Image: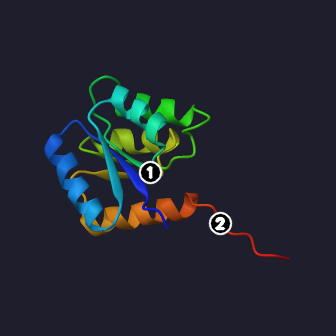
Amino acid sequence: MDKSKILIVDDDPDLRRALNIRLRAHHYETLQASDGYSAISMAQKEQPNLIILDLGLPAGDGFSVLERLKNSDTLSSIPVIVLTARDPHSDEQKALLAGAMAYYQKPVENDELLAAIHAALLNTSPRSVSPV
C-alpha cells in the first residue's frame, strides 16, 4: 500500500520541520508549503491525502486556503486539520464550518494529532463494498 501523503502548511520552518520528522517516523510521506499561495499550488499538483493547515499565513490566510480547497472540484475531498496558535474561541467554529475536519491549538500532543490524522484518513479512504 502506498504511503499517505500529508501536506504541512505553516509559515514557521521549525514547526514544519518538527511535523515532518514526526509524520515520517509514522510512515507518512510529507510535503511542505509556507504560505497560502504555495499551499493551493502544491495541493493541486500533488493531490495529498490530508492537509495540516495553519490559519496565520502570508499570501492568503488559512481561511482563504480552506475556502479555495473546499470550492475546488479536485481538492474538496481532501481532509483538512487546522493546527494554529490562534484563539479557538473565535476561530474554531469558523474553521469547522468552513470544512476543516478538526481544529487543534499549538502546541498539540503528538498522539492526539496522530489519532486525528489516522481518523481523517480512514474517513476518506475508499471503502470496499461487500458483495450482497
The residue at 57%/32% (across/down) is: 72
Establish if 97 lies above or below 112: above
Q: Secondary structure at mark 1?
A: strand
Quarter holding the C terminus is bottom right
Q: Is residue 29 above or below residue 59?
A: below
Q: Percent x, y for residue 98?
A: 50, 38
Q: Out of 12 and 30, give the one closest to the viewer.
A: 30
Q: Residue at x 49, y 43 (%)?
A: 47
User: Which residue position is annotated with label 1?
Assistant: 50
Q: Earlier in the sequence, mark 2 or mark 1?
A: 1
Q: Position of residue 49 (x, y in %)?
A: 47, 52
User: Residue 75 at x, y = what percent?
Assistant: 54, 39
Crowding at dot 2, Cα within 10 Å, few <14 / some 14-19 / many 20+, comes out as few
Disc 2 residue type (three-letter)? Arg
Q: Which of the pair 78/44 is nearer the observer?
A: 44
Q: Kindly identify which numbered label has been placed on residue 15.
A: none
Residue extending furthest right? 132
Q: Is residue 123 left or right of residue 33?
A: right
Quadrant in the rendering for residue 10: top left
Q: Nearer the viewer, residue 102 or 3?
A: 3
When asked about the image quadrant of residue 109, the answer is bottom left
Instruction: Measure how far apart labels 2 and 1 are at the Cα level.
Output: 17 Å
Work out which residue is located at the far top of the displayed protein and give it: 59
Residue 127 image position (x, y, % from top left): 65, 66
Identify residue type, mark 1. Answer: Leu
The residue at the point 51 percent across, 43 percent down is 99
Indicate the colouring scheme. rainbow
User: Residue visible at 57% across and 60% down?
Assistant: 125
Residue 127: numbered disc: 2
Q: Extreme left residue here?
A: 14
Neighbours of disc 1 within 10 Å: few (<14), some (14-19), many (20+): many
